[in-house]
Amino acid sequence: MTSARLHSCCALAWFLAVVLIAVLFGFHMNVPLCGRIIQHVYCSNRGILGLACIPTPTSDIYGLSMTWSVSTGMFLIIAFSYIRILCASVKQGRTDSRIRSKAFQTCASHLVVYVLFEIASLTIIVSYRFPLLSQNIKKFLSILFIIVPPAINPIIYGVVSKDLRMSIIRLVTIQASHRSR
C-alpha cells in the first residue's frame, strides 16, 4: 500500500467517524433529559438516551443501524484482507510451508481477538434491550467489554508464539514436579 493510499484511508475513516457521531449528536441536541446520572461506567449513546424524558425511536434506529453498518463494514474489510493474505501465503507456501503456517497463525489469533470484541459489543447492545436487567449486570458487562478483549489479546498471541508456549509448558512441568514430591 502506498503512503498516499494509506493517508487517504485514514482520512476517510476519520471523516466517516466524525460524520456518524455528528449526526448522532444532532439527534440528541433537542432531547430533554430527566436525569443526571448515566447508569454506565462510561458515556455512551444508549447511556445518554436512557436519561431522555421522551421516547427516542429515531435515535435508537440510527444508533442500531450505525452499529450494524460499521460492524459489517469492519468485518468485510477484515475478511477481504484475510482472503488476500491467505491467497498470497498459499501461493508462496507452495515452496515454503513456514510462510503458510505463519500466515494462518497470525490470521487465526487475530480472528479470535476480533470475535471476542464483537461478542462483547453484541452483549452490551443486547443488554440495553432488556429493561428489567439489573443496572449492576449492565455495568459489569460494560466493564467486560473494556477489559476482556485487551486482557486476552496477549494470551492469544502468546500461545501462538512457540518460544513463549514452550517456556510456559516448561514452567508448568517444573511446578508440577515440585508439587508431586
Image (spheres, helix red, strand yellow):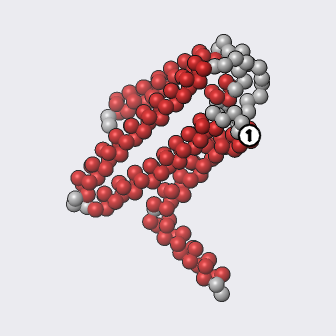
Q: Is residue 67 visible?
A: yes
Q: Is residue 25 visible?
A: no
> Looking at the image, which residue is at 54% across and 55% down?
154
Displayed quadrant of residue 2: top left
Quarter holding the C terminus is: bottom right
Depicted 84 relative to depicted 68: above or below: below
Residue 26 lies left or right of residue 80; in this view the side is right
**Percent from the top left, x then y, of residue 53?**
73, 18
**Percent from the top left, x then y, of residue 177?**
60, 82
Residue 152 lies left or right of residue 80; in this view the side is right
> Looking at the image, which residue is at 49% across and 67% down?
165
Determine which residue is flagged by label 1.
Answer: 134
Depicted 132 relative to depicted 99: above or below: above
Q: How many marks?
A: 1
Q: Secondary structure at mark 1?
A: loop
> Looking at the image, which residue is at 57% across and 73% down?
171
Displayed quadrant of residue 124: top right
Residue 51 or 110: which is nearer the viewer?
A: 51
Residue 163 lies left or right of residue 34; in this view the side is left
**Percent from the top left, x then y, of residue 138?**
69, 40
Displayed quadrant of residue 98: bottom left
Residue 41 lies left or right of residue 77; in this view the side is right
Residue 28 or 2: which is nearer the viewer?
A: 28
**Percent from the top left, x then y, of residue 163?**
46, 67
> Looking at the image, which residue is at 25% across and 61% down?
96
Residue type highlighted by circle 1: Ser
The 10 Å Cα crowd at callout 1, few under 14, some 14 to 19, many 20 or more, is few
